[in-house]
Amino acid sequence: MRKIVGVLAIVLLGLGACVQEPTFSSTPAIQFKSIKKITKTSNDGFGGTVKIDSVIMSINFQDAEGDLGLTESQLKSDVKYKDFRNFEVAVLLRKNGVFIPITFRPALGGLMNFNFKPNQKPGPIEGSIDYSTQFVYAFYKGYSPEFTPKNDTLKFKIFIRDNAFNQSNTIETDPIIIFQD
């Protein structure tokens, strides 16, 4: 019996050593995972309160080289990353049943300024990214003249770039309502 258990353990260890790394594309691939809203009340700085909708978007990603995100030293040492944005988010607002693009200043998204692989060893990587933005009820017109005081429906389009400037596919989130009573 001990001999069988010993042989079985060796076979299982051997099988574990044969695990093959996944094969992903050099172009990052993303999938929509989820979107949620958290409404909170905060101090407005003038003795009153203000309602805020925090919208959290989650995506799954895969990349062959794992070259997602930049370290501070990469940003400082390589001029090609001077105005680099590796996480882009476009806003779509529903008007008359149709989603139209809305321009935000400053644009949503930005820079994932950390390396997803701390050891920086090249190789396939997959995981998820959460991105959050806030909408303050009192400033609804400051986001876009198209916004209304309540019940605006938004969707977001997202894509990412790896450090070699390969751009992923673009995904759309599910719709979400902001500025609800």
Image (cartoon, rainbow, N blue to C red):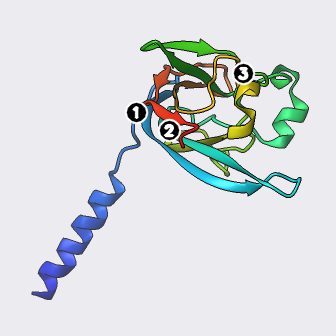
Q: Which mark is residue 72?
A: none
Distance from disc 1 to disc 3, alpha carbons, whole Å, reads: 37 Å
Please name the residue that numbered disc 3 is placed on: 104
Please name the residue that numbered disc 2 is placed on: 124
Please state, as top left, top right, bottom left or bottom right, where the C terminus lies in the image.
top right
Q: Measuring 67% from the left and 22% from the top, which residue is drawn there?
A: 164
Q: Is residue 137 left or right of residue 21?
A: right
Depth check: give the residue in front, 91 or 43.
Answer: 43
Spot the residue most to the left. 1
Looking at numbered disc 1 in the image, what kind of residue is underneath it?
A: Thr
Residue 28 image offset from top left, x and y in percent: 52, 27
User: Quarter-wise, where is residue 72 in the image?
Assistant: top right
Q: Are marks 2 and 1 in contact (CB under 8 Å)?
A: yes
Q: Disc 1 on helix, strand or loop?
A: loop
Residue 96 image offset from top left, x and y in percent: 46, 12
Q: Measuring 62% from the left and 45% from the top, which residue is drawn there?
A: 54
From the viewer's perspective, is residue 84 above or below residue 120?
Answer: above
Residue 101 shows in the view = yes
Discs 3/2, front: 3
Residue 20 image offset from top left, x and y in percent: 36, 44
Please state, as top left, top right, bottom left or bottom right, where the N terminus lies in the image.
bottom left
Looking at numbered disc 2 in the image, what kind of residue is underneath it?
A: Pro
Please name the residue that numbered disc 1 is placed on: 23
